Amino acid sequence: MTIDTNVYFGAPGSLLTLPWPRGGIGGTRGRNVSQFLLGSGGQQVWKTLSGKRTYQLGYQSLDYATFAQLEAFDQGHNGPGPFAILDPGRRNLLTANQSAATSLTNDTTGFTIGGALMSDNFTRSVTGGWGTASSGGAWSHVGDGVNGNFSVTSFAGRINIAAASTEPGQVQPYTMTDVDITVDVSTSVVATGDILRVGAIGRYIDDNNHYLANVHFNTDSTVSVGLYSRVSGTAHTLAVATTGLTYTAGVFVRLRFVISGTSLMAKVWDLNGSGQPAAWQVTATDSGVAGSGKFGCMGRLAGTNTPPVQVSFVNFTATQAPDQISSATTARRGPRSLSWLFFNVATGAPAVTVDPPDPTWPGIPCAIRPHTFSVWALSVGGPAPIYATMTYLDPDGTTLGTSTSNVTVAGTGAWTQVAVTGTPTVGSAYLNCAVACSGAAVEANSVYLDQWMLNEGSAADSSWSPGSGVVPVQVVTLPDTQPWFYPDYRAGVGLILQEIGP
């Protein structure tokens, strides 16, 4: 395999090529280590999970033009940074936990699991229902009321609750066991007499068996959130919590509702506030509604309220909420692998996406040279058709192009490698990697993914290499000497770069 031996350095999208340094590149990854003397006389050693490299590039001499390029970074002429360094000796550009398939942290740090099953921005006009969602999939009426109580106007799906003690709703035709729903909700009035409930429905098997997460619009203008189940026609209150929010008629708040296994959780936040709360505001454990069901929106008008009341929904999204995804059950290399639970596919392909190495970057910094992304897969429950992708982004994060592999059926008997090779589109500054389902996934099929690798070159490396990641760096120092009587050269140049971040 031909390898590009250049060292690239600079801002993503504006990388320059550095001469190969005399003696190579020093880049030991430092991890804090502490030794403890136990009371028994034994020893214990603790080492931090994360670590950062200090790169040392030493040059016997450089012409002034090349030195001036480095000095511009050192002295701030190219902005404050941070910058990126691409060293051809780092054979796996993924981070340690990504390349180790969750074995470093025993969780899915560095991965985003799922992929939008469907979404709806309600940019249409419909009477007598909600029509077809933006991503496809026709909404259908469930619960109380008649079709005439539903409409889509002014970028919102609306339910006119025409009678007290009723619970009308709309659901999508697709089913999932585990789901992550986000939707903005509002009510046309401030509640009087009793609370108004507006929320999301999941595992909807029928009117008598489903889960609900409701935003409570209370009579004192406060907002709370509750989790409910209906099992064999009997309603159960699982948990209710306050949110600290207040509301105004017609003003939206955002609800997030997750069902994963027997765990239910929800949170609500103000769209004009500080953003999504880090912690779930209400949680519950329940096994009353098992199996796969539909999902959607629902409202409820308590008996002491005066109908009609209109409730509204905007920005609805539903994605896979995965079960256990860092698994010690099956692995090809090391103690763990990433376990991906398939669900019934609706629109778009669900995917496991590799996160950028730094939150300020939309992807992994790259040079315009061939790259290969590969991963090994083993299915449990039945064959799983999957493929690998690399997406190329400009400095602003706009997609410029994509490379996609052929569909590979991951079997149940042996590990199968899935790989894609491509060269970033001219103008690319970053690339992103993902493994996606082809659209024929089967509910409850798990696929184990191991030995993740992104390497420079036009083919997958013959063996897996530990991931070192592409971490932002800052210039620490740039010592140099101007030789006597040779102003066009610099001697003893030593570029020291430090990886930064958490």
Image (cartoon, rainbow, N blue to C red):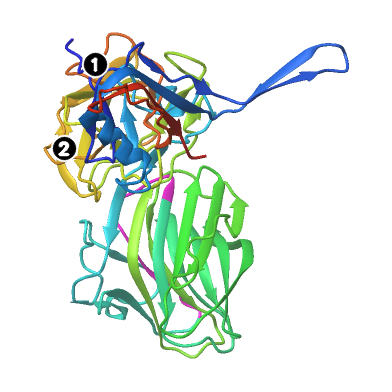
Q: In the image, what residue occupies the spot 40% across and 85% down?
A: 162
Q: Quadrant of residue 471?
A: top left
Q: Is residue 355 above or below residue 279?
A: above
Q: Residues within 10 Å of mark 1 (few under 14, many from 20)?
A: many
Residue most extreme to the front: 485
| Residue 188 picture location, percent across and down | 41, 85
Q: Is residue 84 left or right of residue 272?
A: left
Q: Is residue 409 visible?
A: no
Residue toward you, 395 or 181: 395
Region of the chain picked out in magenta, as a range: 165-179
Which mark is first along the chain, 2 or 1?
Answer: 2
Tell whether label 2 touches label 1 (CB within 8 Å).
Answer: no
- Residue 172 lies in the magenta stretch: yes
- Residue 284 seen by the camera: yes
x and y percent of residue 376 in the render?
33, 19
Q: Which mark is residue 402?
A: 2
Q: Which mark is residue 481?
A: none
Residue 78: x %, y % from top left? 29, 45
Q: Quadrant of residue 178?
A: top left
Q: Is residue 381 above or below residue 333?
A: below
Q: CA distance from mark 1 to mark 2?
A: 18 Å
Which residue is pictured at 46% across the width and 88% down the height?
A: 189
Q: Residue furthest left?
A: 426
Q: Secondary structure at mark 1?
A: loop
Which quarter of the figure is the N terminus placed in? top left
Identify the amino acid type marked 2: Thr
Where residue 186 appears, as percent x and y from the top left, is: 42, 77
